[in-house]
Amino acid sequence: MRVHWDSSLRLLRHAPFRNQYLASSTSMIGSAITPVALTFGVLEATGSVADLGYVLTAYSVSQVVFMLIGGVWADRVPRQRLMMLADGLRVITQVGFGVLLLTGEATVPLMILLQLVCGAATAFFLPASVGLVALTAPPGLVQEANGLISLTRNLIGTVGPMVAGTLVITSGAGWALVIDGLTFVVSMIFLARLVLPERVRTAAAQVGFWKELRAGWHEVTRRSWIWTSILYFMVFNLMFSAFQVLGPAALVDQHDGGLRWGAIIAGLSVGQVMGNALTVWLRPAKLLLIGRFVLLLACPVLLLLAADSSLILLVVASALAGIAISFPDTLWDTALQEQVPEESLSRVSSFDFTGSLVLRPVGLALAAAIAAAAGTEVTLIVSAAVIVVATFVSLLDPATRRLTRLPVPDRDTDDLLPDGAPDAA
């Protein structure tokens, strides 16, 4: 079944989702500015690549450490309030970082501390955001809501670094980070306008933190399609890291290698946007089964890099890889939001986020190590082969193959938008 593009965009007429969408979009703008502005800011302040590594690592480690904690709290308290708190912390960290750079007071310990706090805030924001979609999206339009948010994220992710670079050149990294921080203020304003019914927590849910964390783990392990999917995504991320590390390595000896790699990355970005656009148009019944087969589209670019193929083929294959990343990701979020009880959704998504984050740096290091021992071409081919094998192994689980999306009433989108959900006064 297909849902027309204009019907999906009419989601924005629904006040609860519209406010979450606008909050998420402005938050994404800040997140897109951060990498460029922070990188140049640290390098200008210290002149040390090692110090930059310490600051960036602090953010990543903090995210991993606090992600499960954030998931528990997002199921305990109103999610939009937790997201506002996280945004407030990010205002302090990013504006504070910018002020330190502008005043010449930035030191490595202070920058590391600010990024530790920022990473923790993001770890609370992400699971809450996934859980909130289940509350703000109209019944039957969860996939379209996820697709619209993801499409916007990829569009901003494509344009954001260029905007950040312009800000750094014209105003300096300090002011770029101040502007970055102010985007989270706008996000807080939209979240404050979000009016939802109070969530009623059952007596079983009103227990201690560790019991709630174990209950979230139980929600993961009692559904084979969830834990097998998380394991599969971990393997996929581990293997596809070869693209990021070995893609440039395969082209470095060519006189136009940098230009070719830039075109390949542009193709990847275009593919991600295309994949997200498809999710607001197509509604596959078998969310995970279709998602798995689409993920196989990530393999051709690895094989073509190993074969030193033409630039046109590499760009097309990279676009397919972009679709492979974005389209199944939205289907996965939709499956969680439709099938997992709302009161456990953020905890379950936090386990998913943690699995993806933990092995990302491991994959980068592993790809480089294997390539040093066996060669770039062999590593790329092996990575593609492992993805194919892992895909079909994951489909041995009957629940993964059979998981079907919830039925949608055969009505116009307007009929699916509930009344009585105005903006806050």
Image (tube, rainbow, N blue to C red):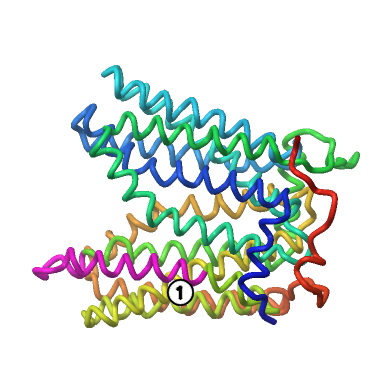
- The structure residue drawn at horizontal position 62% and vertical position 78%, both measured from the top left corner, is 395
Q: Position of residue 79 (x, y in %)?
A: 70, 40
Q: Is residue 348 left or right of residue 60?
A: right
Q: Which residues are magenta?
A: 249-275
| Residue 201 against residue 354 in the figure, above or below | above
Residue type at mark 1 is Ile
Residue bearing the label numbered 1: 387
Q: Is residue 248 left or right of residue 150?
A: left
Q: Position of residue 114 (x, y in %)?
A: 43, 27
Q: Position of residue 210 (x, y in %)?
A: 72, 37
Using the image as rendered, state which of residue 362 and residue 68 is in the foreground. 68
Using the image as rendered, state which of residue 354 and residue 115 is in the foreground. 115
Q: Is residue 330 left or right of residue 99?
A: right
Q: Quadrant of the C terminus?
A: top right
Q: Quadrant of the N terminus?
A: bottom right
Category of crowding for the residue at label 1, using alpha-carbon neighbours closer than 10 angstroms: few (below 14), some (14–19), many (at least 20): many
Can residue 40 be seen in the rendering of this structure? yes
Using the image as rendered, state which of residue 315 and residue 302 is in the foreground. 315
Q: Is residue 397 magenta?
A: no
Q: Quadrant of residue 200?
A: top right
* View extreme (left): residue: 255
- Number of residue marks: 1
Q: Position of residue 15 (x, y in %)?
A: 72, 49
Q: Secondary structure at mark 1?
A: helix
